[in-house]
Amino acid sequence: MPGALECPLDVNLGRMEATVATTQSAEPVGPPAGAIQIPDFEIVPRRGLILVAIVIAGLVVAIAVNELWPLAFFHVAFGAAWTIIDLFLGLVIGPILGRLAVPARIEMTTRLMPKMVLIMPTVVTATLAAGWQLGHFLGTVDSTYYHHGWMVASYIVVGCMAVIALGLLEPANIAVLFELKKPRPNPAVIERLMKRFIYSAGILGVLQIATLVIMTKIASG
C-alpha cells in the first residue's frame, strides 16, 4: 500500500517540476531592468567616405586650376555649410541635447555624431584651403590690402574655430563613439565628453557670429 500511494505522488511532483522548468526556460532572456539599449552604429560611416573623397578631389582640382569660380564656389559653399552647422549645432542642438533623457541622448548621439566625424574635417579643410588660395588669387592676403586689419581679425577668429573644431569638438565626438562601443560604457566618461562637445559647439556658434560680422564688413567696403 505505501508503494501504491507514493507512485502517483512522485508522478505529480515530476509533472510540476517539468512545468516550472518549461516556464522558466520560456521566459525571454534580455538585458537587466534599467539597462540602457545602445543601437548598433559605425564610428566612421563607410559610405560617407566616398563623398569625402569626391569633395577632396574637387578641392585639389580647384586649387590646381586656380581660377576664380571654382575657388569661390568651394570657399563660399563650404564656408556657409560650416557656419550653418556651427550655429545650428551650438545654439540649437547643443542645448536640446543637454536636456534630453539619457536613452534619447544616446539615440541621437549614435545617429548624429558618426556623420559629424566626416562632415567637420571635410568642411573645415575645404573652407580654409580654398579660402587661402582665393585670397592669393584676389590679393586679399597681401599686407597692402586696404582691409588688411579686418582680414587679420578674420584669420584669428577662423584659426580659433579650426583649433576648437578639430582639436576639441572632433576628438570629444570620436571618444564618445568609442566609449559607446564598449561592452560596458562608463556613464561618467560619456557625460564629461558630451559636456565638452556641447560647450565646444556653443563657442563655435558664437565665433561664427563674429565671422559673419567681419565678412559682411569686408564685403561692404
Image (cartoon, rainbow, N blue to C red):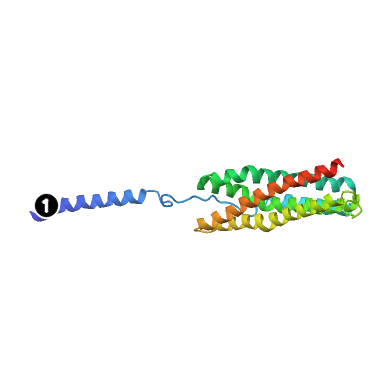
Q: Secondary structure at mark 1?
A: helix
Q: Is residue 5 left or right of residue 38?
A: left
Q: Is residue 66 left or right of residue 29?
A: right
Residue 174: x %, y % from top left: 62, 56
Name the residue rendered at 58%, 49% in the picture: 109
Pick the front one: 153 or 94: 153
Name the residue rendered at 28%, 51% in the picture: 18
Q: Is residue 5 visible?
A: yes
Q: Is residue 110 left or right of residue 138?
A: left
> Which quadrant, please, contains the C terminus?
top right
Residue 34: x %, y % from top left: 43, 49
- Taking the view exactly as shown, the residue that stands out farthest to the left is 1
Name the residue rendered at 11%, 56% in the picture: 3
Pick the front one: 156 or 149: 149
Q: Is residue 180 visible?
A: no
Residue 113: x %, y % from top left: 62, 50
Q: Is residue 121 left or right of residue 146?
A: left
Name the residue rendered at 56%, 56% in the picture: 192
- Counting the numbered discs, the total is 1
Residue 103: x %, y % from top left: 51, 47
Q: Dot 1: within a 10 Å radius of its alpha carbon, few (fewer than 14), some, or many (20 or more) residues?
A: few
- Taking the view exactly as shown, the residue that stands out farthest to the front is 149
- Taking the view exactly as shown, the residue that stands out farthest to the top is 220
The amino acid type of the residue labelled 1 equals: Leu
The residue at which mark 1 appears reads as 5
